[in-house]
Image (cartoon, rainbow, N blue to C red):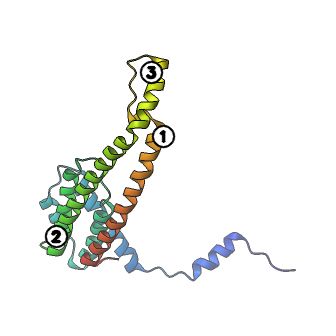
Amino acid sequence: MAFIKSAWELALEKTETLQVDPEKIKHDLKVKEGRQLAAAFLMDIDITKEETLEKFSAYPAEEQKAVTEGMALTLLANLTLPRTEKFQESFAKITELGNIIAPENEDLTSLMGQLEAFFSQYFKNQEDMIERMKQQFAPQLEQKQAQLRQQYGPNFMLRPEQDPEFMKLLDKNLSQLDTQYNNILMQAKNQIKGILNIE
């Protein structure tokens, strides 16, 4: 009769072959600390660039590379298509974080400047698209409005945002715009990874 091993025994067998790498654990811990340091800088308006640099400088030289990697990963995670036109405030903090990670790196400074212009263009394209679609949809909307006025009276107004058909079409077009811009953003992020020498 064959011996049937329990799940516990199988798990033990698998873990016997695993090697614990203390250097990797230490590296991962420092990367995590770098992420937290960068996140604190980005989220807390009271934390200054100088304080963050001071905390970073307190790490021994051999740990700074891993901490820098964590900070860079946080920077990359925060580079997303902006949702409001007031993105410049948070983007300024992200740019400052880039200066902390790689001080006086002209390639990074130039790329961050290009990204700011890219995000502004994204908003402009979004607004233009919404305006164009409203104009194209105006005849249909007027027709619907005329029908609804018979029901609800002569003062009834129908805005494009109230029309499910318009909103569905708008969502589809905005989604395509986001896809195009996200593809370019991904390329920029890969360039930043190259500049900062992280994987």
Return the residue at label 1.
165
Amino acid type, mark 2: Ser
166 vs 74: above or below: above
Disc 2 packing (10 Å; few <14; some 14–19; many ≥20) = few
Mark earlier in primary sequence (1, 3): 3
Mark earlier in primary sequence (2, 1): 2
Q: For the residues carrying marks 1 and 3, which lies nearer the camera in this image?
A: 3
Image position of 141 (left or right of 87) = right
| Distance CA(mark 2)–CA(mark 1) | 42 Å
Q: Secondary structure at mark 2?
A: helix
Closer to the camera, 143 or 53? 143
Mark earlier in primary sequence (3, 2): 2
145 vs 77: above or below: above
Give yes or no for contact between labels 1 and 3 (Cβ–Cβ under 8 Å): no
Return the residue at label 3.
149
Return the residue at label 2.
110
Amino acid type, mark 1: Glu
Closer to the camera, 163 or 5? 163
Disc 1 packing (10 Å; few <14; some 14–19; many ≥20) = few
Question: Which residue extends farthest right?
Answer: 1
Question: Which residue extends farthest top?
Answer: 153
Amino acid type, mark 3: Arg
Q: Residue at x 20, y 65 (%)?
A: 114
